[in-house]
Amino acid sequence: MKVIKKTFGLLSSGKKVYLYTLKAGDLSLSISSLGATLTALYIPSRKRGKEDVLLGYPTLEAYTHNKPYIGVTVGRYGNRIGKGQFPLQGRQYTLYKNDGENTLHGGRRGFDKLRWKADAYEERDGVFVRFELESPAGDEGFPGKLKAAVSYGLTKSNEVIADYAAQVDAPCPVNLTNHAYYNLAGEGSGDILNHEVTLYAASYVEVDRNLVPTGELVPVRQSPFDFRTRKPVRQDIEAAGGGYDHCFVVDGEVGQLRPCAEVYEGSSGRTMRVFTTQPGVQFYTGNFLDGIQGKGGSVYHKHDGFCLETQHFPDTPNRPEFPAAFYGPGKGYHEKALFAFDW
């Protein structure tokens, strides 16, 4: 196991951004301190050898204009908050609207656009980088001073670990996740429509035309959203509106690390299994990728990557019927995700 740290580049402010490359087992994972961003993940395969399965950019400069949130850690609140506002303790809080009339992934300058403090360390059977960030009270309209600590790591068992924690000194909604785009055939290899997906979810969060929840949790049975039995992404995608961008309600006990998804890619033989403590997982099929210049000369088009974002449900601050996402003094935020790879 080892960690390699190098300078990724300089921001316009002159501040350095570092790139950490972790090596453990048969995997190699690279993470940037700008946005605590996963930039590369090399995985072997029996059929083609090692390939990078994460979409990304070739330079730091490109990551500073990362409209699709490729690889980033998002916060304070991942996904959408409807109408850019929410009520809390008799007060209405107004956020920056960066997605039409809604707030998406923390607002205009969310955690994905900030430089995180970072330290690498070894622990038992893995190597990790701990990223820390302070968000002042009122940041993007959110109440309370928040301190976030996110650790990403690799284990000797070929697992990627994500550990999310936050403390806030006033009641505030918190929802941290990672927005990596995967293509298990290798980034730049084309679309992910032949990937075969299982989602351990008997229902999903219904959304309106602006992708904001209606408040209904709808059974997946006999619908295009039924992934309880493994099927290719392409099988029902047109019936689902031409792409998936939906939060699925993960079966099992919230707070316990449990399976939420499994993805198999036939040409490489790679499998990814995902576990989470969170109530939901957002399955997104790269519907808004539109000819983005990626790394290694790749160009990313619609459906060239998929995301599995473990998270609280979208718009939970406005939906008291959803599992609560408010934290504050005496109630810290702590969630975990695990991504296990086979080939």
Image (spheres, rainbow, N blue to C red):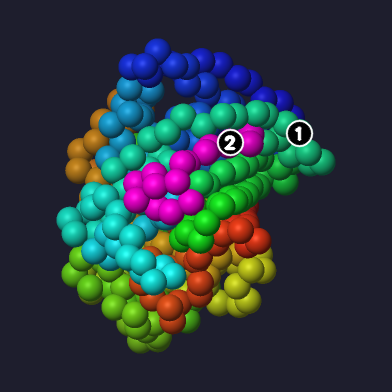
Q: How many marks?
A: 2
In depth, the one of 155 and 31 nearer the eye is 31
User: Where, quadrant-wise, is the N terminus in this rendering?
Assistant: top right
| Dot placed on the residue nearer the N-terminal end, 2 or 1 | 1
In depth, the one of 133 and 272 nearer the eye is 133
Residue in view at x 37 percent, y 58 percent: 79
How much space separates mark 2 and mark 1, taking CA atoms? Answer: 14 Å
Instruction: Tell me which segment is drawn in magenta.
Output: 129-144
Residue in view at x 42 percent, y 33 percent: 114
Does residue 282 lie above or below 109 as drawn?
below
Residue 210, given in percent of the width and then of the height, sits at 20, 65
Does residue 23 lie above or below 331 as drawn?
above
The residue singled out by tag 1 in the image is: 122
Q: Is residue 132 magenta?
A: yes
Residue in view at x 31 percent, y 73 percent: 213
Residue type at the position of mark 1: Glu
The residue singled out by tag 2 in the image is: 131
Residue 305 seen in the figure? no
Q: Is residue 198 magenta?
A: no
Residue in view at x 40 percent, y 13 percent: 14
Quarter location, residue 124: top right
Residue 88, given in percent of the width and then of the height, sits at 41, 68
